[in-house]
Image: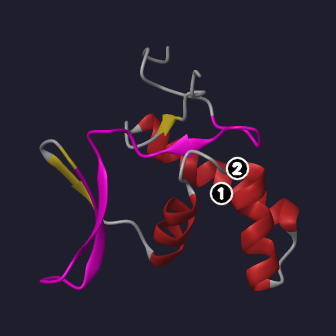
């Protein structure tokens, strides 16, 4: 059973790193890492590129559109891969759903 923090990623999701997690470039190791309390995750190059597009304003479909255009790849394949990767990060507590801003 999913916990209360878990989110379900879909094409309409607007994922963002939660407040407690930061995407940073580690100069010492020359790698990108996600820093969270008592945890560090080193995503691969593709994951870093996807995470940099996850700003809470773009939805997953828009992220897939950008990557499909950049790499001239089939959008459906990219969308499936992006959803799977983001869901894995969400399940580990490294992603949150952007909240609507209330006026």
Where is residue 25? Give x, y as percent.
Answer: 27, 74
Q: Check if residue 22 falls in the magenta segment.
A: yes
Element carrying mark 1: helix
Q: Residue furthest front?
A: 103
- In the image, what residue occupies the spot 45% across and 41% down? 95
Q: Looking at the image, which residue is at 55% across and 54% down? A: 54
Where is residue 75, by image quadrant? bottom right
The number of numbered badges drawn on the structure is: 2
Question: Which structural element holds mark 2?
Answer: helix
Q: Nearer the N terminus, badge 2 or badge 1?
A: 2
Q: Nearer the viewer, mark 2 or mark 1?
A: 2
* Residues shaded magenta: 9-35
Q: Position of residue 57 (x, y in %)?
A: 62, 47
The relative height of residue 18 versus residue 30 in the rendered view (above or below) is above
Which residue is depicted at the point 49% across and 45% down? 16
Look at the numbered discs 2 and 1 and tell me whether their residues touch, using CB distance below 8 Å.
Answer: yes
Closer to us: 57 or 65: 57
Read off the residue under disc 2: 60
- Viewer-closest of 27 and 75: 27
Residue beneath label 1, please? Answer: 82
Q: Residues within 10 Å of mark 2 (few under 14, many from 20)?
A: many
Relative placement, left or right, of 45 versus 19 is right
């Amino acid at each position: 059973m999913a916990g209360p923090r878990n989110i379900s990623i879909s094409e309409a999701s607007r994922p963002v790193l939660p407040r407690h997690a930061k995407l940073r470039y580690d100069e010492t190791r020359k790698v990108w890492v996600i820093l969270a309390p008592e945890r560090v995750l080193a995503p691969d190059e593709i994951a870093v590129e996807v995470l940099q597009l996850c700003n809470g304003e773009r939805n997953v479909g828009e992220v897939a559109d950008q990557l499909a255009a950049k790499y001239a790849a089939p959008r459906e394949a990219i969308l499936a891969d992006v959803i799977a990767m983001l869901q894995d990060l969400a399940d580990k507590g490294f992603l949150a759903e952007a909240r609507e801003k209330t006026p």
